[in-house]
Every structure is written in C-alpha cells, then in structure tokens.
Image (cartoon, grey):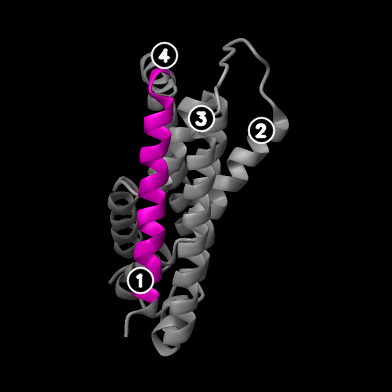
Amino acid sequence: MEPLLAVVSILGAITIGAISPGPSFVLVARISVARSRTDGLAAAIGMGLGGVVLGGLALAGLQALLAQAGWLYAGLKILGGLYLLYLGVMIWRGATEPITVVPTAEPRTAGLGRSFALALATQVSNPKAIAVYGSIFAALLPPQVPVWVLVALPLGLFVIEAGWYAIVALAFSAPRPRAAYLRSKLWIDRLAAAVMGALGLRLLSEAVRP
C-alpha cells in the first residue's frame, strides 16, 4: 500500500473508533457537564495526547509483542480493568456531592491539570485501544515507512482524538445539557459509574479467561 493511502486509511479507521462510545466518551462528557467547558477541553487535549502515545506504541511494534507474549496482554487488561473499576467507584462515591457552577469563575489551573491527566490516563490504560491501534497499523502500514509518515501520523491522531472530544466537550457543556445534569446528577453519575465498572469487569473477565 502506498504511504499516503496508508496514512489516510489509518486515520479514517481511527476516526471511526474514536467516535464509538466508550469509557473515554463517558469521561469527557461527565467532566464537561460536571466541571466546566474548559475542563472538558483540557480532557480533550489529554485524549489527543493519549492517541499520540498509542500511535507511537503501535509504530514501535507493540502489537507484535503482545501477540507473542499473551501474559503481557493479559496483564495490561488486568491493569486497565482495575483502573476503570477504581474510576467507577470514585464517580459513584462522588454522586451525592453537590456541584455549584459559577459560569464567570476563572479557570482553575489545578483543576484543568487534573482533568487533562485523568483523560490521558483513561486513554492510555485501555488495552483494547492499544490492540486496535496496533492491529490497524500492522494491517495498513507499508513495510518501509517514510520519515514524513512518522511525523504525519502522530499529528493526525492528535487532531482526530482531540478534535472529536473537543466536540463532545462543547456539546455537553452547553447550558441545557449542564442544567439537565445538575437536576439528575445522582442518577447520571451512578449510571456513568456503572458503565465504567462494567467495562472494567469485562476487561478483568477477558484477562482471566483461558
């Protein structure tokens, strides 16, 4: 496959994967409605950087390593599952905590850093995302990769991941979604926590399955 066609195909496949609902979508949506639009955009940047990390791992041939070392893939699933379970528990415990939204408040640097770090950790801790990136790269990259591809792919991945989650952040931080969330915070948070927990348990069950 020609390098340009390979890059376009990879970015197209990653775009389809990015817009599919999953733990990253749930997290960015919740951060956007529960904290602020700026926090949501910080989380989107974290997701974008996470995409660059996953792309870099795929370019380094992690998929081939995982195929040879099943125990490593299982270990990644266990770590990812435990992280999602932890995230679910924290969201569940915080469901009863009230939120006071002050639209004119100045952005909190510490809060933005937390939103960014949480999104980045969620993105890179998903072993299925690592496998998807690795499989797509392995299937579509040509044997000889030009230098410009090594530069273009990470940039394209960042634009796709950060761009999509920025759209999510802008949509869910709008006044109506925010007001709806504040009215039903307890049940929305517990639903989000249940989704995170279910995804974590699924990863753990796959890790221990023969």
Q: Earlier in the sequence, mark 1 or mark 3?
A: 3
> Is label 4 in a helix, a strand or a loop?
helix
Name the residue type under label 3.
Thr
Question: Along the line of sight, which residue is nearer the eye, 50 or 13?
Answer: 50
**Residue beneath the point at 55% across and 21% down:** 99
Instruction: Give the residue pinned by disc 4.
Output: 175
Pointer 2 or 4: first along the chain? 2
Query: Distance of mark 1 from mark 2, alpha carbons?
Result: 34 Å
Instruction: Report, in whole angstroms, how far the alpha carbon at label 4 lies from the one at label 3.
Output: 21 Å
Q: Name the quarter where the N terminus is drawn.
A: bottom left
User: Could you tell me which quadrant the C terminus lies in?
Assistant: bottom left
Image-quadrant location for residue 106: top right
Q: What kind of element bears circle 3?
A: helix
Stretch in magenta: 183-207
Determine crowd level at label 2: few under 14, some 14-19, many 20+ residues with C-alpha closer than 10 A. Answer: some
Q: Nearer the viewer, mark 1 or mark 2?
A: 1
Above or below, 206 relative to 103? below
Q: Residue furthest right?
A: 110
The 10 Å Cα crowd at callout 4, few under 14, some 14 to 19, many 20 or more, is few
**Mark positioned earlier in the residue sequence (2 or 3):** 3
* Amino acid carrying mark 1 in the image: Ser
Q: Earlier in the sequence, mark 4 or mark 3?
A: 3
Q: Residues within 10 Å of mark 3 (few under 14, many from 20)?
A: few
Residue holding disc 3 = 96
Q: Which is more toward the observer, 113 or 167? A: 113
Proximity of marks 1 and 2: CB atoms separated by less than 8 Å: no
The residue pinned by badge 2 equals 111
Q: How far across and down, in percent of the image, does residue 51 sit?
A: 48, 55
**Circle 1 is placed at which residue position?**
205
